C-alpha cells in the first residue's frame, strides 16, 4: 500500500473530526446530538470513506447538505431524547449521504435517520425502510405525496369492448393532478406496481371509494385521452372498471418514519 493510501486510511479512522469540517464548531446547535446519535455508526461500513468523499467537490456538496439537514432535525431535541442509531439503519444510510442527489430521496434518507435518532420515533424506523428507499425512483418518491394526504384514491382500468372480446387500453389510470409534477408521467402504472411490490400500497380492482365524483371525472378524462385509440377500433367501445389504491399499514409506518411533515 502506498504512503498516500495509508494516510487516507489513517485519517478515515478520525471520522468524528469530519463533524468539525461539516459544521464548523462542535458547540453549534445539534452537533452534539449528531455525535451521540451516530456514535455507533462512525467507523462502520463506508462511513470511514467520508473523508475521501469530502475531497470530491460534488460528493462534498451532497454530504454537507445532507448532514446539515440531519443536524437541523436534531438541534431542538433534548439530549435525553437522542438514541444511538442502530447500525442496520445508520450504516446503509451513511453510505448514501455522499451521493444521493434527488432532493426527495435525500429527504427520505435523512428523515429516516432522524426518526431512528429520536426516542419518541425510533420504534417506527424499521431497517427494511432503507431498502424501500433504495428501490424508489424520484418520480415514485413524488407519487408518495398522494398517500401522505390520502390513504386511498380511485383508479380505473380502460377496456376496449366489442364482439364478445375486450382489450386493455390502460391500467391503474389515476387523476391527471397526480401526474403533473412527474418526469415520466407515462410510467405511472409501473410506478404504482413497484410501490405495491414494496408493500407500501395495495391495489384493489374490485373495491371503490365512497366519493361519488371521483370516478366520473376519471372516466371523462381518460375517455378523451383514448379517443385516438378508439378511432382505430370503430367496432369497439370504451368501458371502465373501477378500483381503489390504498396505503397499507406498512406503508403508513414508512410514511411516518421517512416523510418529513
Image (cartoon, grey):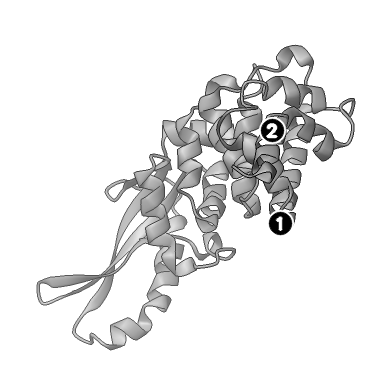
Reply above or below: 12 against 61: above
Residue 135, percent from left and from top: 45, 48
**Residue at the farthest left position:** 164
**Disc 2 residue crowd, few under 14, some 14–19, many 20+, Cα 10 Å:** few
Specify whether residue 110 is in view: no
**Residue found at the far front of this picture:** 2
Q: Is residue 257 left or right of residue 30?
A: left
Picture quadrant where residue 210 is located: top left
The kind of secondary structure element at disc 2 is helix
Q: Residue at x 50, y 37 (%)?
A: 130
Image-based side of 83 in relation to 244, left or right? right
Label 2 and label 1: CA atoms lie apart by: 23 Å
Residue found farthest to the top: 80
Quadrant the C terminus occupies: top right
Q: Is residue 192 above or below residue 229?
A: above
Label 1 neighbourhood size at 10 Å, few (<14), some (14-19), many (20+)? some
According to the picture, the residue beneath numbered tag 1 turns out to be: 58
Residue 209: % across, % down: 40, 46
Q: Residue at x 71, y 56 (%)?
A: 58
Q: On the image, which quarter does residue 24 sit in? A: top right
- Which tag, 2 or 1, sits closer to the chain's start? 2
Q: Residue 96, located in which quarter of the rendered image?
A: top right
Res 10 label: 2
Give x and y (percent) for residue 145. 57, 49
Q: Is residue 152 visible?
A: yes
Amino acid at each position: 500500500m502506498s504512503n498516500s493510501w495509508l494516510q487516507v486510511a489513517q485519517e478515515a479512522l478520525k471520522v468524528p473530526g469530519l463533524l468539525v469540517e461539516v459544521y464548523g464548531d462542535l458547540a453549534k446547535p445539534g452537533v452534539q446530538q449528531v455525535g451521540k446519535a451516530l456514535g455507533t455508526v462512525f467507523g462502520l461500513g463506508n462511513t470511514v470513506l467520508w473523508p475521501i468523499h469530502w475531497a470530491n467537490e460534488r460528493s462534498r456538496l451532497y454530504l454537507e447538505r445532507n448532514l446539515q439537514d440531519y443536524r437541523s432535525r436534531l438541534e431542538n431535541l433534548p439530549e435525553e431524547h437522542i438514541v444511538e442509531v442502530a447500525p442496520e439503519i445508520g450504516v446503509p444510510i451513511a453510505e448514501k449521504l455522499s451521493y444521493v442527489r434527488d432532493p426527495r430521496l435525500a429527504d427520505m434518507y435523512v428523515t429516516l435517520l432522524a426518526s431512528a435518532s429520536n426516542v419518541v420515533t425510533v420504534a417506527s424506523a424499521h431497517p427494511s425502510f432503507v431498502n424501500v428507499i433504495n428501490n424508489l425512483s424520484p418520480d415514485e418518491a413524488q407519487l408518495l405525496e398522494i398517500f401522505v394526504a390520502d390513504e386511498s384514491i380511485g383508479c380505473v382500468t380502460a377496456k376496449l369492448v366489442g364482439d364478445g372480446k375486450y382489450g386493455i387500453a390502460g391500467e391503474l389510470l389515476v387523476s391527471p393532478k397526480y401526474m403533473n409534477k412527474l418526469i415520466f408521467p407515462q410510467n405511472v402504472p409501473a410506478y404504482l406496481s413497484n410501490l405495491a411490490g414494496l408493500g407500501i400500497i395495495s391495489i384493489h380492482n374490485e373495491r371503490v371509494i365512497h366519493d361519488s365524483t371521483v370516478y366520473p371525472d376519471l372516466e371523462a378524462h381518460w375517455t378523451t385521452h383514448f379517443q385516438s385509440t378508439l378511432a382505430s377500433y370503430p367496432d369497439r367501445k370504451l368501458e371502465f372498471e373501477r378500483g381503489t389504491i390504498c396505503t397499507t399499514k406498512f406503508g403508513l409506518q414508512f410514511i411516518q418514519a421517512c416523510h418529513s411533515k
